[in-house]
Each structure stands twice: as structure tokens, then as C-alpha cells.
Amino acid sequence: MTGIFYSMKKLILLILAVFALLPIAHASISDWSVDVAINDDGTTTWTANMVYNETVSRSDYFVLTDITNYEVSADGLPIACNIQKGPGSLITCENITAQSMTYIFRTNQQVIDVLQNYRLFTYRFPITQTTGHYSITIRLPLGSALVDASVLKGTLLKPFDPEFGIQGSDGRYIYVTWNLDKPKLGENILISVVFEQISEANTAQLMIFVIILVAIIVVLFLVIRMLRRQEKNILPILTANERKIMEILIREKGEADQRVLVKETDYSKAKVSRLIKELSERGLIEKVSKGRKNLIKLKKSINPGKLLKQQSKEKNEEK
């Protein structure tokens, strides 16, 4: 019996201590937002904004954990406040004249490891003051992501809870936000998120893949550009004799019998053969044997239509 009475006495003292730390009743809040950023070391950085319905001379903020490095501002201006610690921490600001309060502080480690490499943040947010709107945002560490629900199947955990939370991202950090209208005074909102650090190895592989892909695109661009330049500048860099051969092939839409080239140019067979060899070595034409005749063709990379337009343009410029 003595043990029971001792336990009851201890519980009553704890309850009285909590109530002693609860804030004194004051003006109601129109909007109350809490932003909790989870740090890599498991600690959290809080930013709590409270906008009152009227100007107040006193404001306080209560959390169920020890806090450090706290800063408070009233209507955007820094002010000095007192902190009282017990079962939780209570920041009290008195003799103020403000309608908007911002509390920034850091907590001790609140993140635990669960299910191998997965991490769990959980906290019970008490509604200690009357408010018209209350929002909670939990921001994951940089490079972290919520664990997929399929991984947590069969456990009591969820990627985030309560389920009416809204997942989002600001481009760097993933976060979950819960919005509540007129929560009940004394209500406790139990929030939890399960997240994991994105593998550095996967990130490195992705970066290597992106670099290789960009390199391939750049090389292809340079090759195409080089071919286009080559195609564009073919005629001006040819000798008069070579150009005559090319002009016939262009006129004949890319191919002609070698005998036609001899006849059209009025060159000897030996000279035409030598010109064909030189143009072939430069990668501009190719010789295809068909029975007793040789068919001379422009390379596939050479567009006779474009060369014809170029030739016409040069003739017009000469006029």
C-alpha cells in the first residue's frame, strides 16, 4: 500500500509541475505556425510564429523538451525573455507591446533510428493557447526523403502521421505540413515522420551518368557542326579540276558513270581516274564497279541539294 501511495504522490507532483509551467491565459491567437527543421545530428531547430488578435503585453511558449539557443522577437524586433525548465521548457516574455511573436530555438536530440537505416521523428504538440488556425511543418534534413509506404507495410509506422498531412518540397528540402482550424485547447497533436538519407553512392552514380550524357551530347553536336561546315565549305577548297568533277555529280543528283565524267570534262581517262582517286581519298566520293562500268557517287554525308543551292548562290554573287 505504501508503494501505491508513493507512486500516486509522485504522479500528482508531476501533474502539478506541468500545470505550473503552462502559460497564463491571455489574448487568443489568430494564426499559429510551427516550423521544425530536423538537423543531421538528430536535433531540431524550431521557428514558431504567433499572431494575436490584439496587442499583448505578455507572451509565452511551452514545449515538452529541453531547449537551447533561443531567440525571441516581437513585431520583428529582438527582445529579452526568461526561460523556465521543468518537465519541458517555458519561454516567458513580459512587459511587451506587440501583436506578432516569433520564437526560434534548438532542441536536444529527438530523432531515433528504426528499421535499419530509417529514422523516426515524433513529437506531441500541445495546444496550450486558443488559436483560430494552427499549422505544423516538419522539414527533413538535406538529402533525405520520406520512406515509401510499401517498405513500412506490416509495421505500425507510416511515412507520416496523421495522414491528412501534405507533402511538399521547396527545391532543396522535403517537408510535410499539417493544418488545423480551431484546435481544442489542451489537445495534443501527435506528429511522426519516417525518413531516410538518400544513398551517396546512388547520387554519385547519377552524377557520373549525367556527366557522361552531357559529354556525349557535346561530342555529337561538335561532329554534326563539323560535318555541316565541311559540307558548306567543300566547293571553295577544291581545285578547278576537282570542282568540275563535283559539279557534274551535283548536277546528276549525286552519281554518274565515269565515262560521262571523261566526256563532260574533256579530260583524258588517266586524268579523270587521278581526280577520282584524290576526291575519294578526301572522303567526298566513292567508286562502285558495276560490270564493265564504274559508277562515281557522292558520299552519303554529302548533300547534293545543298551543294547545288550553294553553287547557285555563288554564281549569283559573281554576277
Image (tube, rainbow, N blue to C red):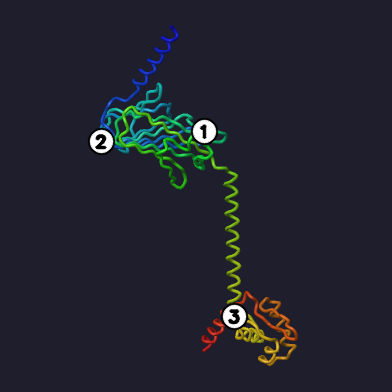
Q: Secondary structure at mark 3?
A: helix
Query: In this figure, which residue is indicated by the disc labeled 1?
Result: 155
Query: Residue sitting at 47 percent across and 39 percent down?
Result: 140
For mark 2, give the secondary structure.
Answer: strand
Circle 3: residue type: Pro
User: Is there a contact, CB below 8 Å, between mark 3 and mark 1?
Assistant: no
Asked whether 189 or 17 is in front, the reply is 189
Question: Which quadrant would residue 293 be assigned to in this image?
Answer: bottom right
Which residue is farthest top? 2
Residue flagged by tag 2: what amino acid is it? Asn
Q: Nearer the viewer, mark 1 or mark 2?
A: 1
Report whether 225 appears left or right of 78: right
Residue 121 image point, x, y percent = 47, 33
Q: Is residue 164 left or right of residue 270?
A: left
Label 1 to label 2, Cα distance in Å? 43 Å
> At x 72% / y 84%, what residue is drawn?
294
Task: Report the amino acid beneath label 1.
Answer: Thr
Spatial separation of the CA atoms under disc 3 and disc 1: 70 Å
Spot occupied by residue 142 in the image (x, y as percentages of width and height): 49, 42
The residue lying furthest to the front in this view is 154
| Label 2 neighbour load within 10 Å: few <14, some 14-19, many 20+ | some
Say which of marks 3 and 2 sits in front.
3
Quarter assignment of residue 60: top left
Which of 133 and 58 lies nearest the eye of the viewer?
Answer: 133
**The label number, if any, that marks residue 53 in the structure image:** 2
Q: Taking 16 as reference, is 228 above or below it?
A: below
- Sooner in the amino-acid sequence: mark 3 or mark 1: 1
Q: In the drawing, does residue 230 fall left or right of residue 276?
A: left
Q: Which residue is mark 3?
A: 304
Above or below for 300 versus 70: below
